[in-house]
Each structure stands twice: as C-alpha cells, then as structure tokens.
Amino acid sequence: MPTSSTEQMRQWRGPALLSYGFRPFFLFGALWAGLAMVLWILSLADVLTLPSAFDPVSWHAHAFLFGYLPAIVAGFMLTAVPNWTGRLPVVGVPLAGLFTLWLLGRLAVLFSAHLPVLLVALVDLSALVALAAVMAREVIAGKNWRNLIVLAMLALLILGNAVFHFEAARGDYAAQGYGLRIGLAAGVLMISVIGGRIVPSFTRNWLVKSGSDIRPAPPMQRFDKLTLLFSVLTLVFWVAQPDFWITGLCLITFAALHFARLSRWGGIHTLSDPMLWVLHLAYGFIPLGALALGVAILWPDILLASAAQHVWLAGAIPLMTLAVMSRATLGHTGNALIATPATVAMFLCLPVSVLARLSAGIWPDAAEHLYHIAGASWILGFFGFVAIYGTLLLNKKPDR
C-alpha cells in the first residue's frame, strides 16, 4: 500500500495524464476554453449553428463559467487537497472517471438541442457533484476544517449551474440570469479566498529568497476577513438586485477594499518575476471588475453591465487560473518556476482580451473589431498554454 502521494503516483503504471489531478483538467480545460471561443466566433459569423438548446450567448457564457472553470477548480483541488489534508491523491481510474464526467458534460450541453433537458442538466452537474463528494470526504477524513469554505464555494458553483440550466430550460435569457451571477460570484470568492492566501505567501517566499527586507502583509489578517465578509454581502446584493443603486455603491466600496488589500501584498516589488506579478495583476481584476459593475449600475449610459461583468469573466478568472495552472504545472513536474518569453506573451493575451471586450461596451461603433481582438487574444492565450505546457502535462516524469 502506498504511504505518500509520491509513492501512489509512482505506482500508477497507466498514462501520465492520470497520475495527478492537475494534468487532465488543466490540459483539456485550456483546450476547451480555446475551442469554445472558436465555436463562438464561428457562430457569430453565421458560419456555424451551434447544436445547443441554449441561445448562443448563454451557451458562450456557460461554456466558460460552468465548463472551463470547473475543470480548473477540479485540477487545483485534486492537487492541493492532498497537501492540505495529508491524504493520498485521486489518481488512475477514479481520476479518469471524474474527467470523463466533465467531458460528457461539455458534450451534453453542446449537443443539448438533441437531448432531453433533464438529462443534459444531470450529466453536466454530475462532475461538480462528484468532485464535491470527493473533496468533502478528504476534508472531513483529514479533519481539515479550515478548508470547508472552499467546499462551500464549490457548492455555490453547483447551485449557479443548476439555476442556469433551470432558467435556460424555461426560455429565459440565462446569460443575464441569477444562475450566471451566482456562478460568477462563486468564482470571484474563490479568487478572493484562495488568491488571498497564495499571492502574499508566494510573494513573501520570493522576497525572502531574493534577499529583500520587504515583506507583504500576512494572509487572512483582520482586514482581509472584514473585506471578505463585506464582499460576500455585496455579492448577495448583486445576485439579488443587480440594478439597484445601493448595489452599485456597495460594489464601488468592494473595489476600494480589494485595491487596498492588494496594495498590502507588495506586488510592485515583483516586477522582475512574471510568475509572481501575473498573480497580482490577475487579482487586480477583482476590484476592477467590481468598479466596472458599480459604474454600470450607477451610470448605465457610460458602460453596459454585460460588458462590465466581463472584467471578472474574461479577466480575473481566466488570468488567475492561467497563472496558477502555469505555476502548478512547472512545480509539480520538477521544473523551475521561470516564465519564458512565450509564457509572458500568453499571460498578456488575457488582459488584451478583456480590455478589448470592455472597450466594446464603451464604444459600440467599434464593437465588431474589438470583439475580434478580444476573441483572437483569448484563443492565443489558451492555445498558447497548451502549446507551452502540454508536453509537461503529458510527460511521464514523476511529480513532486
């Protein structure tokens, strides 16, 4: 019987792809993000009619928020939770089962026009529910109670997906419904909580190693906890009343608190290391997105809410996940945490994409060209990850 994660992974004699959770989910999650954007662009150009029961915009939103994001969450949790709990990771056949459920969900939603509504919802939700069950077992067995909050956020993502399916089934415009806002709130909270742990911790370790006397504020101090509490309340208001002026004021306050939180982590001192500054940049899209949404609520003539929410959807979530995916892939395959010029270019594609999409909501006359820039930058970013890190994810080299 294996007694450690390393021993269990080494005993696995099947494909390297199934030797650790981050491998299949990071690789195919990135592939899906790029492919879904290609399909979306072809749909916009009337070259392709999507075989989905969802309207095209709702399918586009679902493909990322409830397709891509769960894959990366699964890869991250299946890799991190063994370190948190001291228990063995999920590898081999069980890992293949979780991955297959996720893949079937993508196919079911894409071809949902030809399938029963309930079947599509059940298949799509099954991967997240199974992941939650596995993570709950590990957290409880390992008595790692502090990470129950991560399970709560995963449950929120499941709820958002279920509501999204319900809204789409009854003919609502799910792309602007409760389900999307619940799911997006879950993603924002995941970055706020998990990012709030890893960004200052990684920054401190790097500053110590580089011999600097500067130290970021430690994670999860009283200010952080108050900021997170206010964030939860604000997101509840936004989910329930996205057009209410009080929600707009709360979102702007949310932005100020998170900008202040970010400023305490010393990101300005990490500019020589792209693997670090990208984490700070990605977190910066959390307050920027709240500010954009607040402006869209209070001054709708300046910015459309649908464009503003892309600061979170197309900025914070994809850039933070790409940053974490790159770091985890290098670290767990025994490589130095060094960003090549290709990796830096990959990182920069995502800010270009979100800024182009946001600009399309400000200058509608130029929207068509800006959409093309946003889509092309997005595709380059995610296919770039596959090109740069795909070999490492498929490599048989033992994980650390």
Image: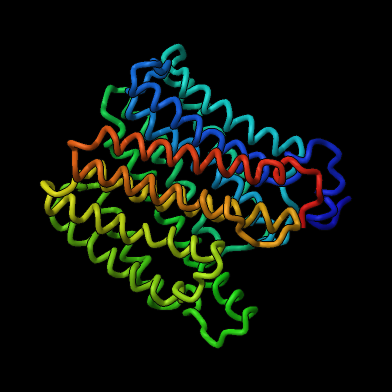
The percent coordinates of residue 380 (x first, y second) are: 49, 40
Q: Nearer the viewer, residue 393 or 245?
A: 393
The percent coordinates of residue 257 (x first, y second) are: 31, 70
Residue at horizontal 32 percent and vertical 49 percent from the top: 355
Could you tell whether 302 is left or right of 197 in the image?
Answer: left
Tell me where residue 212 sits by quadrant: bottom right
Could you tell whether 282 is left or right of 130 in the image?
Answer: left
| Colour theme | rainbow
Residue at horizontal 73 percent and vertical 57 percent from the top: 87
The percent coordinates of residue 216 (x first, y second) are: 49, 79
Residue at horizontal 68 percent and vertical 55 percent from the top: 330
Q: Residue furthest top?
A: 114
Residue at horizontal 19 percent and vertical 45 percent from the top: 362
Quadrant including the C terminus: bottom right
The percent coordinates of residue 261 (x first, y second) are: 38, 72
Tell me where residue 71 sits by quadrant: top right
Q: Residue furthest front?
A: 341
Count of numbered tags: 0
**Is residue 124 visible in this depiction of the protein?**
yes
Q: Nearer the viewer, residue 165 or 311?
A: 311
Could you tell whether 33 is left or right of 256 in the image?
Answer: right
Location of residue 112 with respect to 240 vertically, above or below? above
Could you tell whether 7 is left or right of 342 in the image?
Answer: right
